[in-house]
Image: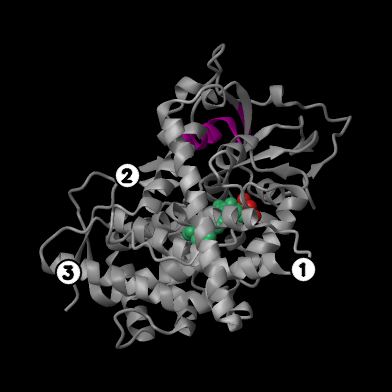
Amino acid sequence: MHTVHQPDADNPRRVADLPGPRAWPLVGNSLQIESLQFHRTLEDWAQQYGSMYKFRAGGRTMVVVSDNALIANLLRDRPEALRRTTRSSRALEEMGTAGLFTAEGEEWRKQRKLVMRGLTPAVIHAFFPTVVAMTERLRLRWTRAVQEGRRVDLLRDLKAYALDVAIGLSMGQDINALEHDDNPLQRDVEQVFYRVARRLTSPFPYWRHFKLPVDRAADACVERIGLAVAGFVAEARKGLAAHPERRTKPTNMLEALIVARDEADSGFTDQHVIGNAVTMVFAGEDTTSNTIAWLLEFVSRHPEAAAKVVAEADAVAAGQSVLQDFAGLERFPYLDAATTEAMRLKPVAPILGMETNREMEIGGVLMPAGTMMLAGLRHSARKAMSIPEPEIFRPERWLHESTGQGGTASSDAGDDPNRKLFPFGGGPRFCPGRYLAMVEVKMVMSMIARNFVLTHDGSAAPVRELFTFTMTPSALPVSLALRT
Ligand code: HEM
């Protein structure tokens, strides 16, 4: 039953009545928040003020919800009752990333269908040889570095790998960011995302009134990205004309989007295709690379888990340095469990923003239309799950029946702990890239297990969580040696 419903006249609790940290005049609670630790501050406040509290920053009151069941309901009540925050959508759209992530209402419904056509298991299967080749490229780069005694910058390389995969899938191009730092498209994409992140944490949207040189530079990047992607669309159209069989079996997401757009009365324009191609890059790069990075951090500190990952990879990819068999991806129950466990402790989206579309009662509190809400995804799961030693990384917790969704679940749905975790969000706006992301996680982790030995640098400072667009590890003190 949904907890979101129309205001109840008998229940006058209002946002102003909610507890929360004491706000100062004008600045509110801004001075208590360090932007890189934003999520930690919200989680600490939730400990103090409970599962629904308020704070003020950037001239707005925000409500933080950390009740697991309530969050599940809120996620499910989109796009009707709640939307993404106007602030984040506008910041993204101003930077050329108008697509599924920012769309609302009917437009979202339409675009969701479009994007899902480009991310079906069949499309990912057809794209799989490219993922294999990109994973092989990563293996070769790391092997050479180890042989030559150079330290591998794992964070940098994982990010470049995820970018290559995202651009390969959504734009049909191999920019090889892994081996070249100076690709113009990569530079533009990085600069745009950096600017969006800065704008999201800016107290005042000054760029709507005047533009600094950095804003003009970012606008120029947006324009160049738009032109480049329009060029890729034209190229992909030529490819489809030369190989008409690809219209029924697209080899990447861009082809699938073009086929859908070209259908009679589709209602889609090339701009939808371009905006969503850029959206996939924004949504699929740091999320995937940081998930792999956190997982590596855990596995390298837990030799018994590392041994199990190796044993599984040896069994599934016997005789191969990089897994070649798409069906083999389904045979990694331990790695799936380890990934779920890493995402439980270090989800790349520990909080998720939403905004009410109309006045409504949520959890017994009357929220006006336009109330900004932050769902404490990680904190709520931690409170709702009664598991022994919750701070410990223990993949075995998830080793029951595999659901194939990067985790496992018991068939007893009532108290299924898997349903308390939201690493990919939930409800109708659930991450459509999860399947691809899990393919990347398994390809990279099995490649590492087959070829390298991980060593955690015991003398390194503890890795900190940094809240950028996603939750990023401050460092990855892990080194690689060749497996003999
Ligand atoms: C491990 C990697 C990833 C994680 C942890 C992740 C997580 C998330 C989360 C938490 C959301 C918000 C969901 C919600 O509002 O309920 C989301 C949305 C989204 N993700 Fe992912 N994601 C990952 C990889 C990807 C990849 C690889 C792609 C694209 C190929 C992608 C595309 C998207 C899109 C387009 C949305 C917006 C969906 C909508 O609004 O309907 N994600 N993701």
Nearer mark to the viewer, of 2 and 3: 3
The residue nearer to you, when weighing 473 against 393, is 473
Along the polypeptide, which appears first: circle 2 or circle 3? Answer: 3
Q: Residues within 10 Å of mark 3 (few under 14, many from 20)?
A: few
Q: Would you place residue 437 above or below residue 192 in this image? A: below
Q: What element carries label 2?
A: loop
Check disc 3 and give the amino acid type. Arg
Q: Residues within 10 Å of mark 2 (few under 14, many from 20)?
A: some
Q: Which residue occupies 36% across, 70% down?
A: 134
**Which residue appears farthest toward the top when viewing the image?**
25
Ligand 1 closer than 8 Å to label 3 CB: no
Residue position marked by numbered label 1 in the rendering: 264
Indicate the position of residue 160 as horizontal and vertical percent values.
35, 58
Q: What element carries label 1?
A: loop
Q: Tell me, for residue 474, which label it has, or none.
A: 2
Residue position marked by numbered label 3 in the rendering: 144
Check disc 1 and give the amino acid type. Ala
Q: Tell me, for residue 360, which label it has, or none.
A: none
Along the polypeptide, which appears first: circle 1 or circle 3? Answer: 3
